[in-house]
């Protein structure tokens, strides 16, 4: 778990990365934050960066697994959320002042070992994010997606399957389901105070 101070640093690093890319015209690297980062940023963590504009999703990409340091994962995810999310056109520099930046730090995903009919009871809305895998297909939804969209556990499983390009009931037909938790830090308003969001 990150402290509130570390969470603020995480969001500021994501925003600084996007600003450097869009306004500076270069791809930021480690230590571009211009400050000494707390030790936790040297630990390997999974992370997602989410960008919203006027309440609408503008980009969301991340590292589901702890395959790089938190610092590098935030930098990579911030760049990808801003300019590589295939669902949206790249963010423009003029949008920076209207974007809300959110960083979700993930725990290691763990497979839910339960018969399909018991899976909905194993998913805690507001606590768990989900990954569904089947063959080459994989989909992930962050923990905040279910409460923000008023989903129950069956809806959440179904939407995660669809994110993977599978039928909504693939979870009941043998697809592997993994859960993880996320610690969410976000700006209350563009470039504003950073808070930890809990559901």
Image: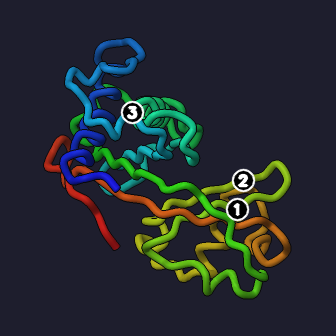
Sooner in the amino-acid sequence: mark 2 or mark 3:
3
Give the CA separation, mark 1 to mark 2: 6 Å
Give the CA separation, mark 2 to mark 3: 28 Å
In the image, 47 versus 141, the foreground residue is 47
> Which-is-in-front pick, marks 1 and 3?
3
In the image, 134 versus 38, the foreground residue is 38
> Which-is-in-front pick, marks 2 and 3?
3
Circle on res. 40? none
56 relative to 46, above or below: below
135 relative to 181, above or below: above
Q: Name the spot of residue 106 as percent of width and height, x first.
A: 47, 54
Q: Name the spot of residue 88 as percent of width and height, x first.
A: 51, 40
Circle on res. 132? 1
Sooner in the amino-acid sequence: mark 1 or mark 3:
3
> What kind of element bears circle 1?
strand
Residue drawn where x is 72% and y is 53% of the image? 138
Residue drawn where x is 42% and y is 38% of the image? 43
Residue at the spot of label 3: 42
Using residue 197 as the reference point, say whether residue 166 is left or right of it: right
Residue at the spot of label 2: 138
10 relative to 154, above or below: above
Q: Quadrant of residue 10?
A: top left
Residue 196 visible in the snapshot: yes
Using residue 151 as the reference point, say whether residue 132 is left or right of it: right
Residue drawn where x is 63% and y is 68% of the image? 159
Using residue 188 as the reference point, say whether residue 43 is left or right of it: right
Sooner in the amino-acid sequence: mark 1 or mark 2:
1
């Amino acid at each position: 778990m990150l402290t509130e101070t570390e969470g603020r640093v995480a969001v500021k690093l994501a925003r600084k990365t996007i600003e450097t890319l869009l306004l500076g015209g270069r791809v930021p690297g480690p230590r571009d934050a211009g400050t000494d980062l707390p030790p936790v940023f040297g630990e390997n963590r999974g992370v997602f960066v989410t960008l919203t504009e006027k309440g609408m999703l503008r980009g969301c990409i991340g590292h589901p697994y702890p395959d790089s340091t938190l610092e590098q994962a935030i930098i990579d995810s911030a760049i990808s959320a801003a300019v590589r999310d295939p669902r949206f056109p790249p963010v423009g520099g003029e949008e920076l002042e209207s974007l809300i930046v959110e960083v979700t730090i993930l725990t290691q995903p763990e497979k839910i070992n339960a018969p399909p009919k018991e899976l909905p009871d194993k998913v805690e809305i507001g606590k768990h994010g989900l990954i569904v895998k089947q063959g080459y297909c994989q989909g992930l939804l962050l923990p905040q997606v279910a409460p923000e969209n008023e989903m129950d556990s069956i809806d959440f499983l179904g939407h995660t399957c669809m994110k993977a390009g599978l039928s909504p009931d693939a979870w009941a037909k043998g697809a592997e389901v993994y859960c993880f938790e996320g610690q969410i830090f976000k700006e209350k308003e563009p470039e504003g105070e950073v808070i930890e969001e809990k559901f």
